[in-house]
Amino acid sequence: MRHRVSIPPPSGPPLRGHLPFADAPTVPDPIEVTSRWLTRGGRPWFPVSGEFHYSRYPAREWEEELLKMKAGGVTAVASYVIWIHHEETEGRVRFDGDRDLRRFARLCARHGLDFIPRIGPWSHAEVRNGGLPDWVLARTAAPRTDDPAYLTAVRPWWEAIASQLDGLDRAHGGPIVAIQIENELYDRPHHLRTLKRMAQQAGLGAPLWTSTAWGGVHLPDDELLPLYGGYPEAFWTEADGGWPDTCRKHFFFTHQRDDEGIGADLRPTTVRGTDPDTYADRFPWTTCELGGGMAVAYHRRPRVDAADIGALGLTKIGCGSVWQGYYMFHGGTNPTGERTTLQESHATAYPNDLPVLTYDFQAPLGEYGQYRPSYDELRLQHLLLADFGEVIAPMRSVLPDGRPRGQHDRDTLRWAVRADGRTSGFLFVTNHQPHEPLPDHPDTSFTIGFPEAPPLTLPSTPVTVPMGAYFCWPLRLDVAGLRLDWATAQPVCTVVDDDGRTVLVLAATDGIAPELALEAGTVRSVAAPPGADVAAVTDDDRILITGLRPGTDALVETETPAGDRVALLVLDAATARTAYRGEAWGAQRLVLCPEGVVFDATTGEVRIHPRPADGANGANGADGTGGADGRGSGTPASTIALSVLPAPHRPPTTPGATVKESQDGALTRYTLVPDEDALTVPAPTLTALRPAGPAPAPRAGVLGRASAPADEHYDTKAAVYRVDVPPSRTAATPPPPGSDLLRLHWTGDVARAYVGDTLVADQFFTGRPWDIAFDRLPPGEPLTLRILPLAADAAVHLPLAPTAGIAEVRHVERITTRTWRLGTT
């Protein structure tokens, strides 16, 4: 079927200077907001922000985790400043250790990351009281209003934040580009204005002041930039409610920005402050909470897979987003409260019971920094935005006439175009959604009509868009003087080799043969790899390249009439997901590596974090198959390989390994062969101490939703196990830096891990293994596991339900990896 769309001509320039957002007058790259996109230094700017809560992660590991985020394409780090984490006891304001806001902000600055503090005072964030300390609620009956008692409590807290961030604003060369006021407050614009004025009076400043805008929010006029969101799943809906339509909508191309489902458990859904399109004419489409994952509540435990996150993110770009903001990008662990536990719960009148400690969120980077496949899916899109976001941001989203008839239409292909209104653009297709697979679309082609250029029809022969595919194809993309009329492959990034040749890297789509169509007038010569076909299409003044076998050797070399050399490298889809680009050994380089890669410009190092099979994404299942051999079934092979373009002048070196060099198509491969065959670590031992008793009787809490079992049931009805893990080295010879995880394959309802009487980890069963990081535990101490069975009549939604009445650990393993530090001599 041929799908058609006609691109309308430009509707005129965006509004400028109509909003009271101003950057510091001395900055070299001032940030401004038009009605359709953001600018920085006078050029369109497409930021990528990722949420990482510093107070939910050990401070000693912040720097490496921030570098992981940067390598994943995040350009700005957002974080709630959670009041109850800092001032649980009135007057005792803590910014020490894991609460050191200033150090976290300075680490962002050190590594070229913008910082966005979300200062509340109410945050939500699945925190007790939404982040308000108990003593604040005891003082006022009207929190989140202009009640004088409430504002009197807020003012010194914001002064404390301002003191921490003093000198880190843009005027002083700092990283703070935006500050969010409150969260999910939809009907009190006067209070939002009051809070903004108070923050400014306290000394806080940023070019952008923002607010969440879902749920028909009513904002004070032009005071706050509205930010939107969208999740592939939700824990806050009913256990028996099925997949929410408010989540389903995000897998369709639409121009409706609002998501009335987010936070709907905390506000009346029948009351809306404004029409969902109220702000569309004055503000660009910016987001702060695209789902990087999803938390689990006791009553509803959704499973989010990598493709769900990747497809949603790419769809939002096609819809018109000019700011990709993810919640969460990095998981964490709730701090231990001094007076109470600090999670959202029925005990504090919230509609959901959350785990006491874990806030993993199924995020691209997990609770202990684990890499997830969703990290690779999003990184591929962020590489595209890093090179082409400046081009995409001003482009309008155009929807075809033949659109799905409704949210339950699974048969109509979902697609859109971002176009400049003249000659060029990007084609977006999404054929994936959770829960209900979309069918293949055979005999598919597209015709895009442009106002100032002939229409483009692609591919040359209709193709089948496979079930589960989602991709972005370029339309008349200029690359260093070469015009790529179209490609059936997604742009990834560009690099420049040592000879000054520009290389455009593209990712093929599984199931669709890659084709490249070059405008003949921009090509003096072209050379394709063996097996590919180069044909001149005289009617269209185009050179068509077909028959490419994607991979590291699928390099098409061209020369432009001006004598510039441009190459097109078409990677297969799996290899493309291993692509990183960053400053490595003195230059910007493309690095292909299936492991985690970090670029540290401050030390000149490239660090490799080996990635075991990810239990949190179901790699090892929940049935406990495999043996605990001391390395663990997920431990990677002893050699590590990476391919680089352009290659450094001298091969990288690393302590503890020999580096062997070879050719990998157009790239140079470096294989690290450790001096020792593998890390030698002792296996954990599992001892069953007591079988489970009968499952606790289900309890109903707020809104009639199932409540988590009471604390006393862990003492009386839980299955009990002891896990002993001998140290891997003596104190005199500690293990090299890396990752050391205990992975538990278990079944049941809920589980907790203790060292002595101290709770150190917990989990609600979702069918996935449970990881616990050894470096969070006292060394040499045994771990006690307490697991409760699920009652047969429990009103709980689970993607994979355990057998009722069963609570057991089926298998334990130790997953130990070593971080490799690569420099050059």
Image: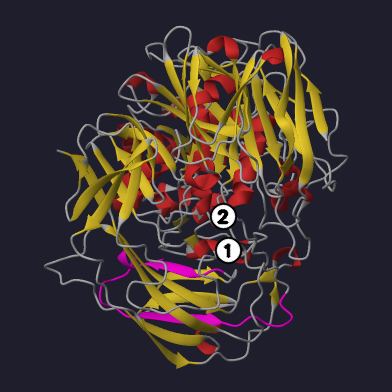
**Res. 37 mark:** none
**Residue segment shown in magenta:** 768-794
Residue assigned mark 1: 354
Residue assigned mark 2: 126
Q: Quadrant of the C terminus?
A: top left
Query: Where on the picture, by quarter, is residue 782?
Result: bottom left
Q: Say which of 764 and 494 sits in front.
A: 494
Residue 81 vertical position relative to residue 695 in the rendered view, above or below: above
Residue 468 vertical position relative to residue 109 in the rendered view, above or below: below
Q: Say which of 482 and 653 sits in front.
A: 482
Percent of width and height locating residue 335: 42, 59
> Secondary structure under badge 1?
loop
The amino acid sitting under disc 1 is Leu
Residue 125 belongs to magenta span: no
State the count of labels: 2
Of callouts 2 and 1, the N-terminal one: 2
The residue depicted at 68 percent of the width and 82 percent of the height is 791
Residue 366 vertical position relative to residue 14 in the rendered view, above or below: below
Q: Is residue 108 left or right of residue 284?
A: left
Percent of width and height locating residue 790: 64, 80
The residue depicted at 48 percent of the width and 25 percent of the height is 387
Distance from the alpha carbon under mark 2 to that under mark 1? 7 Å
Name the residue furthest left: 732
Percent of width and height locating residue 370: 42, 56
Q: Quadrant of the N terminus?
A: top right
Q: Is residue 140 visible?
A: yes
The amino acid sitting under disc 2 is Glu
Query: Where on the picture, by quarter, is residue 508?
Result: top right
Residue 653 vertical position relative to residue 331 in the rendered view, above or below: above
The residue depicted at 21 percent of the width and 64 percent of the height is 735
